[in-house]
Image (tube, grey):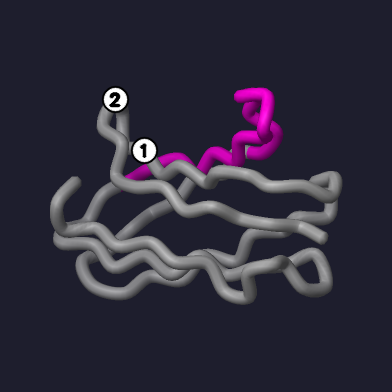
Amino acid sequence: VQNNVRINAYPNPIVNNKTTLIINAGKSATGIVSVVNAFGQVVLTAQLNVTKGENRHVLDATSLAKGTYMVKITTGAELLGTVKLVKQ
């Protein structure tokens, strides 16, 4: 899966406390979305079911403070991908 996954976030920077993660996956999987702050702390998590092809997941960023974050998508111990996310 790792080599066949592309992740984008739109809009980025976040607008109206929401952004959509666009995940293009090579196969179906169940994963976890983790939002990590500049200190390496996980500040938001959500479960994610990915199917082969394009997937969209709306991320509610209301609880996030202004700053830069890394969004990580994992299945078990495997990191599928990351994307940098900004909240202004």
What residue does disc 1 label?
74
- Residue 34 picture location, percent across and down: 54, 39
Q: Residue 62 falls in which quadrant of the image?
A: bottom right
Q: Marks 1 and 2: CB-CB under 8 Å?
A: yes
- Residue 22 picture location, percent across and down: 43, 70
Look at 46% across and 71% down and name the residue there: 56
Q: Residue 73 falls in which quadrant of the image?
A: top left
- Residue 74 picture location, percent across and down: 36, 38
Look at 63% across and 29% down and name the residue there: 42
In the depicted structure, whether residue 57 falls above or below residue 61? below
Look at 57% across and 74% down and name the residue there: 10
Magenta residue check for 9:
no
Look at 15% across and 62% down and name the residue there: 26
User: In the shown orientation, is residue 53 left or right of residue 36?
Assistant: left
In the depicted structure, whether residue 4 falls above or below residue 33? below
Pointer 2 local density, CA inside 10 Å: few below 14, some 14–19, many at least 20: few
- SS for dot 1: strand
- SS for dot 2: loop
What residue does disc 2 label?
77
- Residue 37 picture location, percent across and down: 67, 34
Predominant secondary structure, magenta span: strand
What amino acid is at disc 1?
Thr
Magenta residue check for 41:
yes
Pointer 1 local density, CA inside 10 Å: few below 14, some 14–19, many at least 20: many
User: In the shown orientation, is residue 54 left or right of residue 1?
Assistant: right
Q: Residue 58 falls in which quadrant of the image?
A: bottom right
User: In the shown orientation, is residue 52 left or right of residue 80?
Assistant: left
What amino acid is at disc 2?
Ala
Distance between the alpha carbons at the discs numbered 1 and 2: 7 Å
Q: What range of the chain is rendered magenta?
A: 30-44
Which image quarter is the C terminus in? bottom right
Q: Which mark is residue 45?
A: none
